[in-house]
Amino acid sequence: MGRLDGKVALITGGTRGIGRGIVERFTTEGARVVFVGRTAAAGEAVETEVRAQGGEATFVRCDIGDEADVQAAVATTVQRYGGLHALVNNAAATELGAVDGRLGDIELAGWNEILRINLTGMFLVTKHALRHMESAGGGTVVNISSIASITGLPGSAAYTATKGAFNSLTRSIATDYARAGVRCNCLVLGLHPGDSWAFYLTDPRFRDAMAAVHLTPRFGIPDDTALACVYLSSEESGFVTGTQFTIDGGAHIATRYPTDLVLESYSDRADA
């Protein structure tokens, strides 16, 4: 028996990386999944692979910043599988060093586009999914946020603004929809250098720099996030809502302050 047997899930940004891992893990756990993305070829390839492994998944091409696209994707989910019990908001625009940047350097068009995908897209998908969950007597929402929402991330003002909003909206949704039987939680992720980010692992400078800010002996993998999403979408977490759960190998608490040098200097002065 899978932990998500009988569940119907909608997953945004499910064609690569962490999103793809969530799709694969959800189907392994017994869920029937609709996942959306903007690239048809990538989505169809994932659907074919998941079905070949015995999972039940359907790809729907969708620009989550377009309300008509979102309504169509939600309608397809309900019509094909008979309901909608779990939503994972994973899609995000990460235009690091391109459209995004320091606040004073971002063009208005770039700012608006990042907010359209990351924040307005999350709003639209959740809004239309909640209507079905509310009428059905409950459901779960998992929002995928980032440590950029709780720590400074240079050159990413628009992205960090949207992820900070994810954290706040998680609490609002959990509060407003509790009586409708809907639970909403947030996962705050560090960098998981897998799949589309795998090229980073070939650079020893990157590996060394990442190792210096993690407390765990390994980097994150997509299944770290996927398994947390399964838990928060299952009955196992029935008493959990409004949480902000960090999955980053301890990076957000690992100090960069040169403590060893400070203590050494202090010791030298104390002995003098």
Image (cartoon, grey):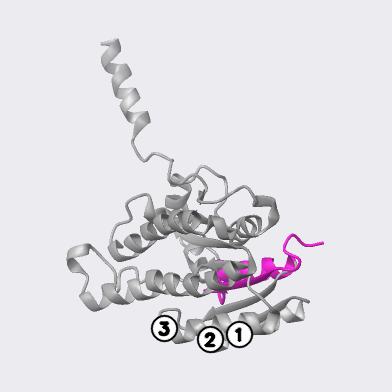
The picture places residue 36, in percent across and down from the top left corner, at: 55, 79
Q: Which residue is at 47% across, 59% downward?
A: 173
Residue at 62 percent of width and 61 percent of height: 226
Give the residue pinned by disc 3: 66
Dot 2: few (<14), some (14–19), or many (≥20) neighbours within 10 Å?
few
- x 49%, y 44%: residue: 250
Q: CA distance from mark 2 to mark 3?
A: 10 Å
Residue at mark 2 to residue at mark 1: CA–CA distance = 6 Å
Look at the image and tell me whether residue 42 can be seen: no
What residue span does the magenta drawing correspond to? 1-29
Amino acid type of the residue tagged 2 in the rendering: Ala
Residue placed under numbered mark 1 in the picture: 76
Query: Is 263 or 237 nearer to us in this picture?
Result: 237
Q: Is residue 9 magenta?
A: yes
Q: Is residue 67 magenta?
A: no
Q: Which residue is mark 2?
A: 72
Asked if residue 1 can be seen in this view, the reply is: yes
Disc 1 or 3, which lies upstream in sequence? 3
Q: Is residue 179 above or below residue 83?
A: above
Residue type, mark 1 in image: Thr
Q: Residue furthest right?
A: 1
Q: Position of residue 43 (x, y in %)?
A: 58, 83
